[in-house]
Amino acid sequence: MIVFATASQKGGVGKTTVCINLGHALARRGWNTLLVDTDPQGGIGLSLSKNTRKKRGFYDFMAKGGEARRLIIPTRLPEFSILPSGSADEFMRGTDFENAPEKLRDFLRQIDLLGYDCVILDTAAGMTSMTETVVRGADWIVVPQQAEPLAVRSIPLLMETLSRFRKEGSPVRIAGILLTMVLNTHEASLKVVRELRQMLPPQLLFQQDIPRDNLFLEASAMGLPIALMRKNPPATALIFDQLAAELEERTGLGDRKEQDHSH
Ligand code: ADP
Ligand code: MG
């Protein structure tokens, strides 16, 4: 099982949108994928519940432990399931945060035993204590970054932070920086993208970037991947398929295909 997480200092850069659509794309490509919401303010999975009450989820596990599988919500795509954030109140109130890394390891071990190929952990913005724990526990992080002139500023700090985590025993590596909300019709936005591509080493940036498209806004209002929207231009769905293919290549996930299907 490979554990992915998102990380970015800023909110509203498209992390959750990337997680939902990338998770769904990986599942369409045959990987058994679980999307976990670790943002206490996050709403992943809520639109799939029958009642409006917030479902139990990640934070309930972090507070009390138990069986992670009971928190999983299946979707219509058998390879894609979701685990909502649940209620963070009890965790924030009572639990000592020092146990969080251990709890997270137990959580991921349980998920692994359920036979998932990929877990995607969506995070809150910034390095909050929980986001730091999640990033340390991940194999790879995807870094959504809005295509704007000052975007590169935060990258050296992020690289430093990750290399410190690795020295302290974390497996975490950067899968890539993903340029989001690119305005393909605006020369200024495209210029920023070109400049970033010149400035940063190619292995640090995904080839595929994510255009600004109102379809993402509409889809996220419904908590859906765009592939499940009625109005869904094939070209838009292909964006995340391409990204998933790149991720397979960059992380060695693709190499596992034959191996995994042989037993
Ligand atoms: P984060 O999780 O980083 O806070 P979200 O994924 O929730 O960001 O995105 C913030 C807002 O921007 C949401 O309303 C979402 O629908 C919208 N959005 C995200 N990605 C795009 C995009 N590529 N094009 C247009 N709107 C987007
Ligand atoms: Mg989010």
Image (cartoon, rainbow, N blue to C red):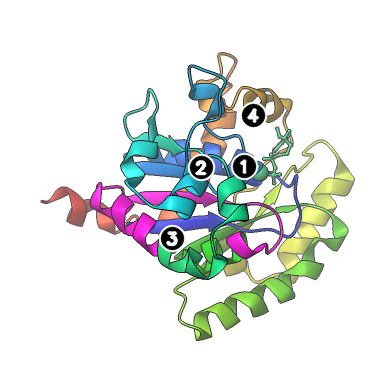
Numbered circles on residues, count: 4
Magenta span covers which residues?
Answer: 104-130
Q: Circle 1 sits on which residue?
A: 16
Callout 4 amino acid? Ser
Gap between marks 4 and 3 measured at Cα: 27 Å
Q: Circle 4 sits on which residue?
A: 220
Q: Which residue is painted at 39% across and 52% down in the image?
A: 65
| Among the two numbered marks 1 and 4 on one chain, the one whose residue lies closer to the N terminus | 1
In the image, the residue with mark 3 has its CB under 8 Å from the nearest atom of ligand 2 = no
Determine whether the residue tagged by mark 4 lies in a helix, strand or loop: helix
| Among the two numbered marks 4 and 3 on one chain, the one whose residue lies closer to the N terminus | 3
Gap between marks 1 and 3 measured at Cα: 20 Å
| Among the two numbered marks 2 and 3 on one chain, the one whose residue lies closer to the N terminus | 2
Determine whether the residue tagged by mark 3 lies in a helix, strand or loop: helix
Q: Circle 2 sits on which residue?
A: 22
Q: Are marks 1 and 4 in contact (CB under 8 Å)?
A: yes
Gap between marks 2 and 4 measured at Cα: 13 Å
Is any atom of residue 44 visible in this view? yes
Instruction: Give the quarter of the image for residue 106.
Output: bottom left
Q: Are marks 2 and 4 in contact (CB under 8 Å)?
A: no
